[in-house]
Image (cartoon, helix red, strand yellow):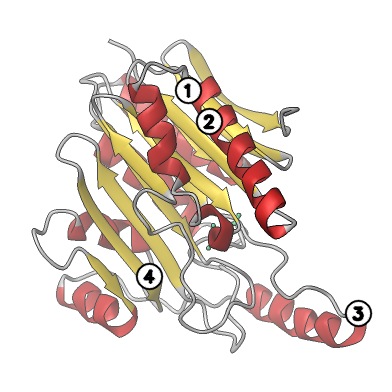
């Protein structure tokens, strides 16, 4: 039986490689995806996820993360959490609970503390310097404060055909305190059903949320569409709809995989992603918007 994992952006590479190793030896998709996302969270130079993540407008690192089990459809998510090392692990722990599975801010922090998750100041000197220079640029060059943000999101399939999805991000650079994007929202930032497949998204959360794109793509895969067709069709149609109704669509990119390890991507901007399966080693790919 095959296995596979796909993740957003170049930053997913080392994690996907490590997860591939686990999956090829029969590891479970929940363990592989959690480890892969933690590796991105822990690396200080990936500036939009975990440690070293980009701060909000008052220079605090508020993080969002989610985890979904495609077999039980259990979801766990945290948003606006500060000073905890691995938000994805907190999200996974929450997914085991029956109630209160999506916690924000101080509630999420209390839960993490109670369950023994490691605390850490997530603001690095580098991120603080970037924040200071962005403040200058906003004043001097009238720059859009929100440029520069990415989410690591992954979909994982193990040899037992068990699928999981997970996301982690610091959200928009310079976001308002308490702002939450699509990444911890089921159906928008991620969705997975082991009987079909999974999707996760990256880009401007405010726009991704308007279309519940991750759920829609899984639904189309369930109707028999190849992941590539489902992703491309959904992102193109939704971008077009936003352009018609609002004049412009923000950046929207998705990666998806079905439960036999076939994968696809859809995007309205150039973006990188990483995929690995039992027949192809982890590799960085570049996707461009498809003509529509
Ligand atoms: C958010 N979707 O918070 C995230 C950020 C992101 O590429 O993925 N940017 O809106």
Q: Tell me the residue at 47%/44% (across/down).
A: 213
**Residue at 63%, 46% in the rendered image:** 241
Left or right, residue 36 beside residue 246: left
Q: In which quarter of the image is residue 245?
A: bottom right
- Which residue is disc 2 drawn over? 231
x and y percentages locating residue 166 in the rendered image: 37, 47
Circle nearer the N terminus (3, 1)? 3
Secondary structure under tag 3 reads helix
**Residue 282 on image: x %, y %:** 53, 25
Question: In this rendering, would 201 be left or right of 131?
Answer: left
Which secondary structure lies at badge 1?
helix
C-beta proximity under 8 Å, tags 1 and 2: yes
* Distance of label 1 from label 2 (alpha carbons): 6 Å
User: Dot 1 corresponds to which residue?
Assistant: 227
Alpha-carbon span between mark 3 and mark 2: 36 Å
Q: Up-down: is 273 above or below 56?
A: above
Q: Can residue 4 be seen in this view?
A: no
Label 3 or label 2, whichever lies nearer to me, is 2
Q: Name the residue under label 3.
A: 141
Q: Up-down: is 211 above or below 29? A: below
Q: Which element carries disc 2, helix, strand or loop?
A: helix
Q: Do the residues labelled 3 and 1 touch (CB within 8 Å)?
A: no
Among numbered discs 3 and 4, the one appearing first in the sequence: 4
**Is the residue marked by circle 1 packed among few (<14), some (14-19), or many (20+) residues within 10 Å?**
many
Q: Which residue in the structure is indicated by mark 4?
A: 79
Residue extending furthest front?
Answer: 245
């Amino acid at each position: 039986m095959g296995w596979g994992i796909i993740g957003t952006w170049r930053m997913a590479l080392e994690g996907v490689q490590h997860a591939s190793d686990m999956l090829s030896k029969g590891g479970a998709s929940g363990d592989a995806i959690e480890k892969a996302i933690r590796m991105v969270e822990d690396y200080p130079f990936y500036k939009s996820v975990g440690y070293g993540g980009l701060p909000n407008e008052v220079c605090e690192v508020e993080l969002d993360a989610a985890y979904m089990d495609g077999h039980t459809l259990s979801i766990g998510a945290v948003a606006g959490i500060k000073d905890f090392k691995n938000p994805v692990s907190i999200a996974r722990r929450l997914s085991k609970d029956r109630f209160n599975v999506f916690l924000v801010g101080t509630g999420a922090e209390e839960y993490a503390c109670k369950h023994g998750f490691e605390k850490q100041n997530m603001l690095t000197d580098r991120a603080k310097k970037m924040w200071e220079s962005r403040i200058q640029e906003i004043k001097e060059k009238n720059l859009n404060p929100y440029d520069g943000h990415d989410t690591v999101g992954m979909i994982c399939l193990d040899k037992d055909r068990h699928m999981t999805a997970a996301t982690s991000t610091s959200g928009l650079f310079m976001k308002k305190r308490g702002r939450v994007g699509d990444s911890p929202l089921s159906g928008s930032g991620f969705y997975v059903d082991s009987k079909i497949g999974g999707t996760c998204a990256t880009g401007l959360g405010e726009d991704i949320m308007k279309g519940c794109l991750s759920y829609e793509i899984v639904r189309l895969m369930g109707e028999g569409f190849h992941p590539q067709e489902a992703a491309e069709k959904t992102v193109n149609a939704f971008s077009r709809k936003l352009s018609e109704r609002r004049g412009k669509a923000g950046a929207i990119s998705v990666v998806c995989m079905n439960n036999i390890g076939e994968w696809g991507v859809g995007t309205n901007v150039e973006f990188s992603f990483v995929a690995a399966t039992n027949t192809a080693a982890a590799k960085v790919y570049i996707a461009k918007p498809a003509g529509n």
